Image (spheres, grey):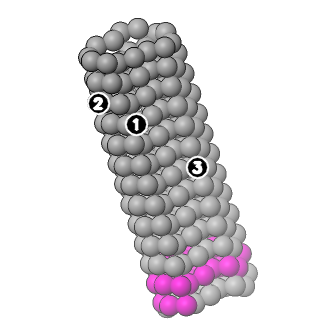
């Protein structure tokens, strides 16, 4: 092990620890700066920041505060209180976001969650992408729960049907297979290939 700095600790082998009060406990793990960070997963790494932990195998945390990467190959890049718990998941900035689905991705915003397989949330507040291959792009309290569904902005919108889409507005829902709602308020597309505009 290579150890530099004050009050750093190690309990495994082949690692590197710099900074202050940092810990490496996974084999071949590294903490390269910051303070009170922990790299406990095998081959994991933390690059700066404070109170961060990389506990998954080959996981990483790049700065920020109180972030955790616990899934295999997961990563968190900055921000506060973010979690990448799904295998090969990623969170990029923001606060209190979580990528819990395998291959899921969350970018910025606050209190968002990408829990579906290969799902994504891009910013906004309290949005959820729970369907496999689903996506939510901004807005507030939107959810894409259908397989390959999509919500683009607005608030309190839901895309629950297979391959459904809701584009903006509020309180809209695409519940039918291949349905779409384009803006407006309190609209619902419930039939197969149905479409509501404004």
Give residue 81's position: percent from left, percent from top. Answer: 41, 49
Q: Which one is in front in this view, the residue at disc 3 or the one at disc 2?
A: 2
Inspect the magenta stretch and tell me whether residue 130 lies in it.
no
Mark earlier in primary sequence (1, 3): 1
Q: Residue 116, percent across and down? A: 63, 55
Numbered badge on residue 34: 2
Q: Do the residues labelled 3 and 2 touch (CB within 8 Å)?
A: no
Between the residue at mark 3 and the residue at mark 2, the CA separation in whole angstroms equals: 26 Å
Q: Residue furthest front?
A: 7
Magenta highlight on residue 164: yes
Give the alpha-carbon distance from disc 2 to disc 1, as whole Å.
9 Å
**Element type at mark 1:** loop
Q: Where is residue 11 in the image (x, y as percent from the top left)?
A: 49, 14
Taking the image as shown, residue 1 lies to the left or right of residue 98, namely left
Q: What stretch is highlighted in magenta?
A: 163-186
The residue to which callout 3 is attached is 100
Q: Find the distance from the CA under tag 1 to the CA under tag 3.
A: 17 Å
Residue named by callout 1 = 52
């Amino acid at each position: 092990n290579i150890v530099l700095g004050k009050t750093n600790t190690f309990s495994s082998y082949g690692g590197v620890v710099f900074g202050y009060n940092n810990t490496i406990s996974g084999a071949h793990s590294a903490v390269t700066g910051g303070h009170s960070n922990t790299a406990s997963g095998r081959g994991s790494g933390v690059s700066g920041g404070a109170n961060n932990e990389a506990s998954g195998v080959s996981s990483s945390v790049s700065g920020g505060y109180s972030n955790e990467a616990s899934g295999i190959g997961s990563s968190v890049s900055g921000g506060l209180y973010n979690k990448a718990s799904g295998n090969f998941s990623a969170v990029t900035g923001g606060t209190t976001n979580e990528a819990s689905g395998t291959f899921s991705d969350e970018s910025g915003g606050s209190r968002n969650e990408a829990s579906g397989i290969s799902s994504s949330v891009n910013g906004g507040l309290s949005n959820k992408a729970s369907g496999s291959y689903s996506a939510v792009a901004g807005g507030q309290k939107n959810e894409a729960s259908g397989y390959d569904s999509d919500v683009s902005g607005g608030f309190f919108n839901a895309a629950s049907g297979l391959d459904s889409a809701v584009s903006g507005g509020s309180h809209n829902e695409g519940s039918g297979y291949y349905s779409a709602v384009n803006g407006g308020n309190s609209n619902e597309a419930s039939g197969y290939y149905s479409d509501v505009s404004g």
